[in-house]
Amino acid sequence: MSKKNPRGICFSILILLVLVSGARTEACAPPIPMPEVWFSAGGAIGETAVLNIHYPGQNLPFVLAYSHSFRSVNPWPPLMPPITVLSTGNLDSLGNATYKLAVPPMKSLIGTPVYFCAAVNSNSWFYSQLCTWLIAPNISRRFVQASPSKPIPYNPGDGHARATLADGTILFCGGMVGGGIPNTRKDAYIYDPVMGTCVQVADMASQRYGHVCTALGDGTALVVGGDWNVSPTAELYDPTRKSWISLGAVPHYLSYPTATLVRDPWTRRESVLVAGGMDNSSSNYSAKAMLYDVQNRKFTSLPGMVKPRIHAAAMAFPFGAVLITGGMDTQTHVLADAEVFLLSTRKFHAWGTMTHPRYGHAMVPVGMTHALILGGGDRNGQFKDMELFDGLNLTSLKWSMRLIRARIFFNPVMQPDGSIVIAGGGISNTGYPGRVPELLAGGVSTILRPIAEQETLVTLQGLNGGGALALGRQSIHHFK
């Protein structure tokens, strides 16, 4: 490359960052109207970025383009000025192409948004959705791909439940295959994040979708809700036997409830509060709640919540209380108010309000009495902002720190040093934040390298002792 215009060349190189090139594809594969473009490595300043295109076809030509502005256009493509064609060629026999580019070591590029789009010619041109990325700083903490293939037969958004067990393995169970209720599952698997192995264990007694799974202090895991049988039930996974213990019928028939482990501050006995979600008996959003006594392995019905809620956030306080914020009510109004369940009274109480309505948001504890509320959305879109909820004074204040990407339906993971790692979030929108991780630490949020995941959906699962897994449709990544 010429050295006469280094900044222009650097910017062009940076743009190339997510391109893809060359190859061919197998004959007779059915056309897929949306090719994929994604990063498989790199993405920070001063290192090589590797971009991929995938589209099953027959020796098909492709074009990779970049734009430093974005407009949401329907139908595709969003190829309107100013755009730059970065690469052209043919896909290989597997329908793949790869493009490598050195990202300039320029700090000024950190946070620069890049938008890539690929077009593949299969009789007529098919365009990918945008691959969105913000250039990251070159820091050591990152998500690293665990293996070339993903052994876990579960995908983000398929309605499964999972929990990290006391021995560090992760239990996956239930969910849905295909696109309908008749395809609900009852199979279960254990994934070992150290060995990278996945082993099928005994099936649950019931097919479940939209259920919850909660790891308990005795090493077992409680599964309840989302039961497609006539009678709602619960069951307990025993990791020593790799089998399930039936807990019989439960008081309420709920899907997508919150499930929160809460401890009595004096006796340290554990309970699980299961509340809200969808009432399967009436198909309405629910205010019903029940409490599971871990020691006696019994459920009891509770007085109802202050309001019906679905897609709310819940978090336990050390003083035997569970804070529940936001969500949607039966009229699908997005809620700003909060309520608290007190283990001592076994009742729900109105408990102040957030700064504005949210659903699909997340909460993490801050000290003994505060909760940091992140992201979520309302009827107008998704949020980057945060707020600090004071659990004793029932007040909430805007927080100066903001997320880098607006997110909804995501799982932040606390680290032992107090930092918070975030990835995933979002539905099919122009942000595609799922593959764009960030780290909250020291009052700021730092962009991390993109997660090398072919699909746009990613979800996080925390690991015992720190770290996290990023689970995508195609791959698993470890946060190092």
Image: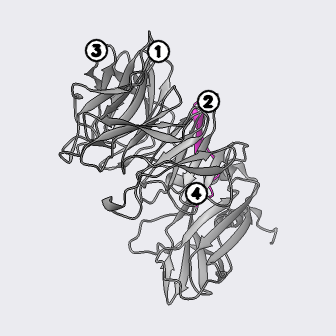
Asked if the residue under mark 4 is in contact with the one under mark 2, i.e. CB atoms within 8 Å, the reply is: no
Give the percent coordinates (x, y) of residue 105. 76, 53
Residue drawn where x is 37% and y is 15% of the image: 392
User: Considering the numbered disc 2 on the image, is that residue within a helix, a strand or a loop?
Assistant: loop
Give the percent coordinates (x, y) of residue 119. 54, 78
Depth check, front residue: 151 or 326: 151
Snapshot quadrant of residue 132: bottom right
Measure the C-alpha gap from mark 1 to mark 2. Answer: 32 Å
| Residue ID for mark 1 | 268
| Residue ID for mark 2 | 442
Which of marks 2 and 1 precedes in the sequence? 1
Which of marks 4 and 1 precedes in the sequence? 4
Residue drawn where x is 53% and y is 88% of the image: 28
- Residue 209 in sight in this render: no
| Residue ID for mark 3 | 345
What segment carries the magenta color?
437-453
Which of marks 4 and 3 precedes in the sequence? 4
Give the percent coordinates (x, y) of residue 274. 33, 32
Measure the C-alpha gap from mark 2 to mark 3. Answer: 38 Å
Residue drawn where x is 61% and y is 36% of the image: 168
Label 4 CA crowd tier, 10 Å (few <14, some 14–19, many 20+): many
User: Considering the numbered disc 3 on the image, is that residue within a helix, a strand or a loop?
Assistant: loop
Which of marks 4 and 2 precedes in the sequence? 4
User: Considering the numbered disc 4 on the image, is that residue within a helix, a strand or a loop?
Assistant: strand
> Is residue 273 shown above or below 105?
above
Measure the C-alpha gap from mark 2 to mark 4. Answer: 23 Å
Measure the C-alpha gap from mark 1 to mark 4. Answer: 45 Å
| Residue ID for mark 4 | 133
Which of marks 1 and 3 precedes in the sequence? 1
263 horizontally vs 423: left or right: left
Label 1 CA crowd tier, 10 Å (few <14, some 14–19, many 20+): few
